[in-house]
């Protein structure tokens, strides 16, 4: 998987409306026998908020897990977890805390996560890579995200030819 392109997108403005629990969202990326998704280069998981994430009641917490599995139907219980994002707070009014757990607000236009994925090592990548949504407190009634793999993190400047 040395070339990252549109096929390395998990989801594009995909709804995250879900009940409490863990759900596979978007598409999966077939890794095949690749043990290094970047072929020697760092690869970043980027997640942005397209529509504000709202719950049916009080504010809640969500997380995303980058997971691989032997089938395209990535299991919430038996898959290999490679990365877990920090908590994201829904419906937040600026306190950034739910039940004593702090997190980043999940509002429209926000970069929810942008960070390097682990290279093959302690937890080898399986055949398919996917994104699991973990709703830990209350049902999400609205909201959408975009998520993809890229060679660059979000939020920084990218200079062509290192100039």
Image: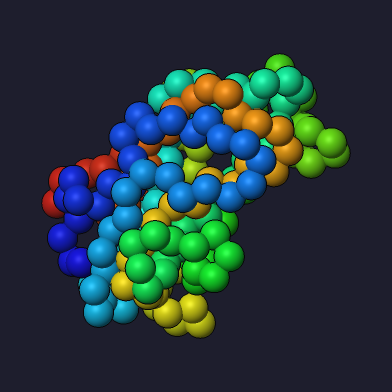
129 horizontally vs 8: left or right: right
- State the image quarter where residue 56 is shown: top right
What color scheme is it? rainbow
132 horizontally vs 14: left or right: right
- Residue in view at x 25 percent, y 79 percent: 33
- State the image quarter where residue 3 is shown: bottom left
Whole-percent x, y for residue 119 in the image: 40, 73
Please indicate, yes or no, whether residue 57 appears anywhere in the rendered image: yes
Whole-percent x, y for residue 42 in the image: 33, 64
Please indicate, yes or no, whether residue 40 appears anywhere in the rendered image: no
Whole-percent x, y for residue 117 in the image: 43, 62
For the image shown, how many numbered marks are present on the structure? Answer: 0
- Residue in view at x 52 percent, y 48 percent: 23
98 horizontally vs 47: left or right: right
Query: Is 122 placed above or below 131 here?
Result: below
Whole-percent x, y for residue 70 in the image: 37, 73
Query: Looking at the figure, which quarter contains the N terminus?
Result: bottom left
- Residue in view at x 77 percent, y 32 percent: 97
Query: Is 128 placed above or below 132 here?
Result: below
Q: Is 29 or 75 nearer to us in this picture?
A: 75
Residue lying farthest top? 93
Q: Is 32 or 73 nearer to us in this picture?
A: 73
- Residue in view at x 51 percent, y 82 percent: 122
Query: Is 39 placed above or below 14 here?
Result: below
102 horizontally vs 29: left or right: right
């Amino acid at each position: 998987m040395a070339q990252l392109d549109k096929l390395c997108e998990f989801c594009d403005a995909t709804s995250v409306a879900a009940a409490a629990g863990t759900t596979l969202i978007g598409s999966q990326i077939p890794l095949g026998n690749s043990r290094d998704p970047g072929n020697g280069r760092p690869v970043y998981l980027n997640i942005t908020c397209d529509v504000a994430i709202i719950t049916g009641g009080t504010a809640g917490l969500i997380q995303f897990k980058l997971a691989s599995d032997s089938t395209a139907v990535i299991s919430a219980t038996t898959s290999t977890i490679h990365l877990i994002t920090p908590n994201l707070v829904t419906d937040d009014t600026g306190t950034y805390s739910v039940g004593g757990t702090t997190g980043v607000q999940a509002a429209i236009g926000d970069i929810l996560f942008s960070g390097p994925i682990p290279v093959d090592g302690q937890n080898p990548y399986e055949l398919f890579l996917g994104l699991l949504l973990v709703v830990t407190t209350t049902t999400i009634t609205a909201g959408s995200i975009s998520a993809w793999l890229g060679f660059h993190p979000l939020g920084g400047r990218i200079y062509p030819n290192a100039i």
